[in-house]
Every structure is written in C-alpha cells, then in structure tokens.
Image (cartoon, rainbow, N blue to C red):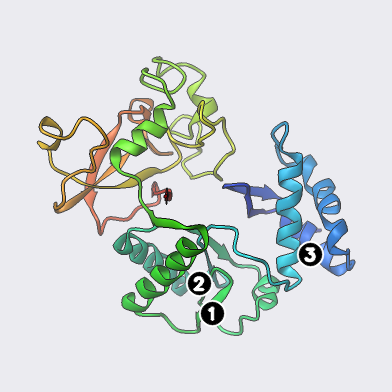
C-alpha cells in the first residue's frame, strides 16, 4: 500500500506541504480525471489528512487544479513568482546542485521557492532524462551535469528580470533588516507578535522552535500567521536580510527606512529557527554571519518592489 508523503504546493503566496498529494495526483492522472474536475477530486483526497484553514477552500482548490494542469503539460502563465525545481532521486549531486542554487541566489540578492523533486514518475513527466537537473519557471536549464556558478547566477537574474517586467516591478530582493522587523512585528510593540511572555503556550502556535520542532524544519504556513497574515516570522528558519553588518550603524542611521551599510564582510540574519530557544525567536532577535555560511536552520524570503 502507498505510504502518504508530503508534497509542496504553492497555495496563494505560501508554499504548503500537503500529505498524500503525490498519491492523489498520480491516481487522478491514472484515472484520466478531466482538468476541470480535478480540483474537487484532489481536494476530497487530501482534506482528511491536512489542516485546511477556514475560508481557504477555494484557494486550495485553485492551487490543486493548477498543479494538475501543470502535470498534464499545459502551458500555464507565470503567476508572478520565481520557482526553481531540482530533480534527482535523492543523490548527493542533486543536493549539491540545490546548495549551488542557494549560493547563486545569495550572490544575486534574489529569493525563490526551491522544490526538490525525487519521485521518478514526476521526473519523467517533466521530460527529464538525466539527473541532477534544474528547472527555472518551467524551463529546463541543465540536466546530467552541474552548471557553473556564473551560469546559475545568469539564469536566476534573467528569470527574475522577466518577472519584474511582467509585473511592472523594479526588483525582487531580500528585505532590509528594517523591513523584516516591521513585517515581523505587524504593528505590535511587544517581544513577540502576540505579547511578551516567551514561556507562553502561544509561541507554540506561531513558531517552530526548540520545544516543538522535533529538530527539523516544517512546511511554511502550518502555524498561525501574525496580525498581517505573515507566517513563520518567529521561527522555522533564521532569515538572511539585505543589510551588511556594522555594529555602529544604528548609532547614526536614518530614522526612516534604514537600508544598512553599503559594505561589510558579514550579512545580518533575523529571527529564530527550529533549533533556537524562545528568547532567540523575538521580533528583535538578530545575528550576523559570513555570506558563505550555510546550515539547515537558515533561509530567506522574497520582497517584491512595487512602483
């Protein structure tokens, strides 16, 4: 009997891990379910195994239908996000390609969802005949060999520029430190978006951290958002921001929208992660690391500039 596994799905602006979605998609394809009936079919198949927030049913159904149409090979329009897929059956070289992509994104100052595709059937449905393989916004860029860092950065910048042009947006980038904290606080002036008590049971509802994470990351959006609807600002992964680190910067920085120093050997990170204690999950929590530093409790989120 098939064992339910998690598959990542873009739902609205969040990427959610859904249990049993792989199995449901494969069954729908095998039964030749029409695309216009797929939303209801897939939703019935996965709703009993996953938490679906109230009022989000139509959003989930639209996301499920879009994913099914993508697997059918339909040419879907860009939805305004940079999406990267790395294909391979769990090999070391596939993980190495993923790490190289993350490094290239850091160098380019952009962010994107990265999906690791391990299932052989799905790899085949994308027309991939050799792994590791890299797909950016639906286009296979390379398969069977590793790209150079220069190639990766060029492909990422080209894809981001295309989206910028489609959306009349000036840039995709990391948030500044000030923007990150503004979003994390969501209008609050307390240590956490809900209050000041680090031992409160409320933190378990907003953040994956040392006490509830089981020592691993979790899909985005599986706990409560803050007052502005933003998920995982207190925990899950510590997040890179755009600012370079200078211990004296804020003693003379602009009061409004400080963008950080122009130069510096290290970059600022904000917020707590699955490995941290509650104190490190405060809205004000910050640190700094070399740009080359990588770890499983580090990540980032994208900012889109609007004209």
Q: According to the image, label 2 marks what residue?
A: 91
Eye-nearest disc, 1 or 2: 1
Badge 3 element: helix
How many other residues sit within 10 Å of disc 2, few (<14), some (14-19) or many (≥20)? few
Badge 2 element: loop
Residue 141, position as x, y percentages in the image: 50, 79
* Vertical arrangement, residue 59 with respect to residue 197, above or below: below
Residue 296 is tagged as none
Instruction: State which tag comes first along the sequence, 1 or 2.
Output: 2
Eye-nearest disc, 2 or 3: 3
Residue located at (27% from left, 55% from top): 293
How many other residues sit within 10 Å of disc 1, few (<14), some (14-19) or many (≥20)? some
Residue 152, position as x, y percentages in the image: 38, 74
Of 191 and 168, the residue lying toward us: 168
Residue 26 is tagged as 3
Q: Does residue 278 appear left or right of residue 143 in this picture? A: left
Residue 20 seen from this side: no
Q: Does residue 25 appear left or right of residue 296 in this picture? A: right
Of 162 and 148, the residue lying toward us: 162
Residue located at (34% from left, 25% from top): 279
Query: Mark 3 and 1 residues: CB-CB less than 8 Å, in contact?
Result: no
Q: Quadrant of residue 88?
A: bottom right
Residue 277, position as x, y percentages in the image: 37, 29
Query: Mark 1 and 2 residues: CB-CB less than 8 Å, in contact?
Result: yes
> Disc 2 and disc 3: Cα gap in Å?
23 Å
Residue 239 seen from this side: yes
Residue located at (78% from left, 42% from top): 47
Instruction: State which tag comes first along the sequence, 3 or 1.
Output: 3
Residue 131 is tagged as 1
Q: Does residue 76 appear left or right of residue 304 in this picture? A: right
Q: Quadrant of residue 225?
A: top right
């Amino acid at each position: 009997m098939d064992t339910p596994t998690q598959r990542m799905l873009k739902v609205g602006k969040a990427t959610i891990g859904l249990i049993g979605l792989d199995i449901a998609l494969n069954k729908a394809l095998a039964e030749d379910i029409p695309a216009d009936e797929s939303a209801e079919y897939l939703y019935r198949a996965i709703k009993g195994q996953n938490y679906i927030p109230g009022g989000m049913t139509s959003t989930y159904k639209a996301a499920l239908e879009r994913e099914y149409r993508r697997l059918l090979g339909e040419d879907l329009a860009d939805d305004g996000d940079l999406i990267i897929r790395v294909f391979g059956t769990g090999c070391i070289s596939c993980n190495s390609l993923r790490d190289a992509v993350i490094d290239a994104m850091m160098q380019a100052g952009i962010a994107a969802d990265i999906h690791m595709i391990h299932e052989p059937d799905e790899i085949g449905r994308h027309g991939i005949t050799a792994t590791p393989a890299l797909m950016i916004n639906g286009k296979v860029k390379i398969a069977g060999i590793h790209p150079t860092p220069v190639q990766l950065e060029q492909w990422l910048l080209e894809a981001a520029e295309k989206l910028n042009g489609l959306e009349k947006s000036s840039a995709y980038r990391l948030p500044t430190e000030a923007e990150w904290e503004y979003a994390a606080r969501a209008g609050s002036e307390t240590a956490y978006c809900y209050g000041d008590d680090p031992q409160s049971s409320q933190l378990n509802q907003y953040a994956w951290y040392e006490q509830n994470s089981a020592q691993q990351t979790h899909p985005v959006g599986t706990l409560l958002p803050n007052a502005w609807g933003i998920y995982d600002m207190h925990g899950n992964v510590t997040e890179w921001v755009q600012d370079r680190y200078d211990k004296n910067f804020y003693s003379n920085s602009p009061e409004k929208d400080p963008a950080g120093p122009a130069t510096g050997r290290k970059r600022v990170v904000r917020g707590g992660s699955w490995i941290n204690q509650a104190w490190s999950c405060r809205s004000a929590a910050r640190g700094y690391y070399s740009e080359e530093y990588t770890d499983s409790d580090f990540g980032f989120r994208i900012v889109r500039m609007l004209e």
